[in-house]
Amino acid sequence: MATRSAGLLMYRRTHGSLEVLLVHPGGPFWARKDEGAWSIPKGEYDCATEDALAAAKREFAEETGFPSGAMHRSLGETRMRSGKLVAAWAFEGDCDPGALVSNTFELEWPPHSGRRASFPEADRAEWFTAEEACRRVHPAQRVFIERLDHLLAQDAGSTPEAHSLR
């Protein structure tokens, strides 16, 4: 059975433009990576014991310290190259990325040193236009931004060709 992850994609509309909040993974492996490294705040859960949306809300709060909103729209699932299934929901909100407070994890660092170091799960957050977010986010997660863009275009009654990613 595939590992499952769930996350939330916070969005806002600024000057008629869609912006989404992405987080950059913490830790030494990701320190010098940018394009294709950003992610929606998400984390693993056990589908036998936890509801996916509840897990997404928990993970969002743990990784960002921000409230997870009240109205959530499903963005479906995608499969990562590793085989992990990621489910996502979108919600409209706003926050100051500089106020990010993330939980931490430990790992042996430097490798084979016997020393353990603590790192934040997310070392920073940033608002991106939908177009820029598609360049920065992990490639398998682009579909969530595209689906959100499509949903918002439908809500506005515009044609997809006239919307921000088209």
Image (tube, rainbow, N blue to C red):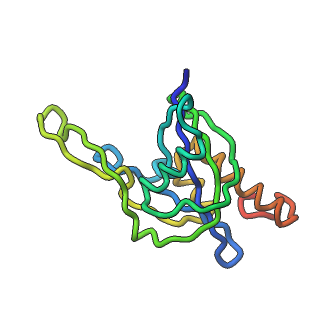
The relative height of residue 85 versus residue 91 in the rendered view (above or below) is above
Residue 6 is at least partly visible in this image: yes
Residue 134 position within the rendered picture, expressed as x and y whole percent measured from the top left: 60, 54
* Side (left or right) of 146 relative to 100: right
Residue 73 position within the rendered picture, expressed as x and y whole percent measured from the top left: 70, 53
* Side (left or right) of 91 relative to 118: right
Residue 31 is at least partly visible in this image: no
The relative height of residue 42 versus residue 155 in the rendered view (above or below) is above
Q: Residue furthest left?
A: 114
Foreground residue among 126 and 10: 10
Question: What's the residue at 77%, 55% (across, down)?
Answer: 150
* Side (left or right) of 36 relative to 145: left
Q: Quadrant of the N terminus?
A: top right
Q: Residue furthest bottom?
A: 15
Q: Residue furthest front?
A: 49
Q: Quadrant of residue 13?
A: bottom right
Question: What's the residue at 12%, 34% (across, down)?
Answer: 114
The relative height of residue 85 versus residue 64 in the rendered view (above or below) is above
